[in-house]
Image: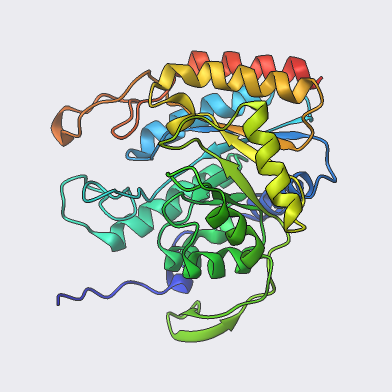
Amino acid sequence: MKQIQILPPAILKKQCPISKSAQDFLMQSQEKANAIAAAVDPSKVFFIGPCSIHDIDSAIAYAECFKKLCNTLSNRCFLVMRVHLQKPRTITGWKGLMYDPYLDGSNDIQTGLIWSRRLLTTLAEMHVPCAMEWLDPLSSCFLSDLITWGFIGARTSSSQVHRELASSLYFPVGFKNHTDGSLEDAIYGVLSAKEKHTFMSINQEGIACAFQSAGNPHTHLVLRGSHQGINYDSKSIKTALKKLAAVNLPQRIIIDCAHDNCEKQFQKQKNVFQSVLEQISTGGHEILGVMIESHLKEGNQILEPDKLEFGLSITDPCLNWEATAELISQANCVMC
């Protein structure tokens, strides 16, 4: 088995430092996120951004648009940028910027970690809060200090090591329902991550250690649809809330407008978003927020490194920026 040594987290962080202003911003963003997840803050959270990040320049260009939009919103709308650097695959394929930054199968993880941290520090300096789906638990040792909200994907919500990870993080973490439509794995994930766990990981010097987490009080359920159909409708949401109440969990959820909720037709994200927004406006206070996949340009493209179009997804198709801004503006009107 081939082995390539990776820089320990402490050295990577020293190479990619952040300013005091960015540190303060991250702390404030995490506090805001925790308050929303705890239903202490009545604001709603809106996650927007690419299906996956494959190009740092286009991610920064998106963040610049994001920042301008933020400046037009009321404080009742908390905008968080999706910065997904790891991509779960059903079988094989490109696994994300962190794993294969050169998009050529060279799988230079060391460079991927450096680029990932540099991007996240740049976004922190821009005062852009970021959300990430956690695929490899070890990646949190290198990047979690730069994140405002986390997610555990549909294929890993039942994973013990991901529940342990979520229990150790100090910002909200959402567990997505399984692709078969069942909610139990995600709900049990929410329950498990609220508890203390002892688990193995590495410290900042890269040494394997046993850790004990404090438990995360800000975990929640994410409804993303399934092979069986949508679950953003009021009936499905009521069913989910009843299941949460049955195990004494707070009735708090986020709706993912993409994936099976849009029936794999990315333009339908608009319909899903507007439906959820209407439910929020008519008393759906249990809905903490909404997530959409968007990029600078509409659709997606085949991964051909020498022919890539700037600002266009290489994984799932996305809404363009103009459509995204219009949806968020509609939400802002509802929340004002």
Image: 43 above or below 38: above
Residue in front for this viewpoint, 81 or 190: 190
Question: For the N terminus, which image quadrant?
Answer: bottom left
Q: Looking at the rendering, which quadrant does residue 41 occupy? A: top right
Q: How is the image coloured?
A: rainbow
> Does the rendering let one see residue 199?
yes
Image: 169 above or below 219: below
Residue sticking out furthest to the right? 40
Q: Give the percent coordinates (x, y) of residue 218.
A: 71, 56
Residue in front for this viewpoint, 306 or 14: 306
Q: Give the percent coordinates (x, y) of residue 296.
A: 42, 22
Image: 330 above or below 250: above
- Apparent side of residue 179 relative to residue 285 in the rendered image (left or right): left
Rendered residue at 59%/30% (across/down)? 232
- Apparent side of residue 125 relative to residue 10 in the rendered image (left or right): right
Residue in front for this viewpoint, 155 or 309: 155
Rendered residue at 44%/85% (across/down)? 208
Q: Give the percent coordinates (x, y) of residue 44.
A: 73, 33
> Does the rendering let one see residue 289?
no
Question: For the C terminus, which image quadrant?
Answer: top right
Rendered residue at 51%/14% (across/down)? 323
- Apparent side of residue 45 relative to residue 138 in the rendered image (left or right): right
